[in-house]
Amino acid sequence: MKNFCNNIIDRDLTKFPAVIYLALIFFISRIPFINLGFSAFTSPTDQDVLAVVNSAYLLRYEHIYTVSRFPGYPFFEIFNSLLIGGGWILTNFATSVISFLSLILFGKILNQLEIKNRGLLLLTFAFLPVIWINSTITMDYMWALFFVLASCFLVFTGKFHSAGLFMGIAAGTRFTSIFMVIPLIYWMLIKKVESKKIREFILIGFFSSVVMFLPVLYKYHIEFFKGSGFLFTTPVNKPLGSMVLSILSSSANLITELTGLMAFILIIILLFYKNAFQSSEQKHLIYFCWMIVIIYCFIYFIFPYKVAYLIPIIPWTLIIFNEKLKKKYMVMVCILLLLNNIISFNIVSDDPYGIDIDSGSIIKNYESRSTFSINQSREYLESLSITLRHKLS
């Protein structure tokens, strides 16, 4: 049994036949969620789903492009207009497919960087609650992650032109993806990549991003630069008390939805566990990962809305802990992270013991979506169809 577990923990699950088994367990675990509506009516899934559906519907049936949210997510909005005729089953399934491809890319990156415990990291990534939930809804988080991971893999393998192109598509899928350019440039500098290739990566990324946003620029002109009301919807320029409350609330959401309380406590303890870098290569990799974590955590606390904003840091956070911890501690962390699917421990002020035991994230999401999401999603599509018929008549 011990040998079997060690084999799974260290195995490359992106190669045949292991990849077939990985695909089976991945899609079997997602199938129950695919037909549960657009999920906009449930927590902790995203309310912006309706804006995406509306944008896709208008483009498909009225040939009018509108952003779902400023500053625009043009690649995802346009691509979903091709799928919206199949309803939520097709759009949710497409997200599941792109999520599985993201999983494979993460596995390829682990191979390329010669990371230990590859199987463990891949399975943990695949079944983290925030990944599981967001891989079955009509939102852009996993789509953007796919293009970001593709760009990273291409940089790691020296294909800088293609990496720039994928980075541009990532920005057109979710504009915050563009911040990944910073750690990637750092990586290229420490690897002593020719300055010409770095410039080409940046230029191709920039121009492909501009091409992605041409529909937005054409439709909205200067309005595009106003974004999504940054100064009004973030803690910026608000009283200090409001900012502190926002940060505390965002931190509580992060613990509850992303890691789970027990895993969070263990992670904090293990942060003080010292394990010296074995090589300069490992040190630079950890610096690269930390750079990504810091950038996206900063963005999360500036836009403190949804834990899904932190999806880009998950692969790199797993690598950080894997490189820092011994195998037995890493296994413990991963088990606790995955337990958050079925059980959660929430801090509650009115409980005499201070902790409330509840159903896990994936269970609550399934119950909520199966109860509310299907009928309300159907009603929303019907309302769009009626509005369209009235307009045409």
Image (cartoon, rainbow, N blue to C red):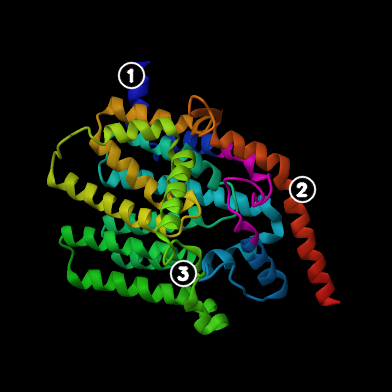
Q: Nearer the viewer, residue 216 or 98?
A: 216
Question: Range of the magenta residues?
Answer: 27-50
For this orientation, the residue located farthest to the right is 393
Q: Earlier in the sequence, mark 1 or mark 3?
A: 1
Q: Earlier in the sequence, mark 2 or mark 3?
A: 3
Distance from disc 1 to disc 2, alpha carbons, whole Å, reads 48 Å
Under mark 2, the amino acid is Asn
Q: Which residue is mark 3?
A: 231
The residue at the point 36 percent across, 32 percent down is: 265
Distance from disc 1 to disc 3, alpha carbons, whole Å, reads 55 Å
Asked if the residues shown at circle 1 and circle 2 are in contact, with their CB atoms under 8 angstroms apart, the answer is no
Q: Is residue 294 left or right of residue 299?
A: left
SS of the residue at dot 2?
A: helix
Q: Residues within 10 Å of mark 2 (few under 14, many from 20)?
A: few
Up-down relation of residue 299 to residue 103 (above or below): below
Under mark 1, the amino acid is Asn
Q: Which residue is mark 1?
A: 3
Distance from disc 2 to disc 3, alpha carbons, whole Å, reads 36 Å
For this orientation, the residue located farthest to the top is 1
Q: Quadrant of the N terminus?
A: top left
Asked if the residues shown at circle 2 and circle 3 are in contact, with their CB atoms under 8 angstroms apart, the answer is no
Under mark 3, the amino acid is Leu
301 inside magenta stretch: no
The label shown at residue 375 is: 2
Q: Earlier in the sequence, mark 1 or mark 2?
A: 1
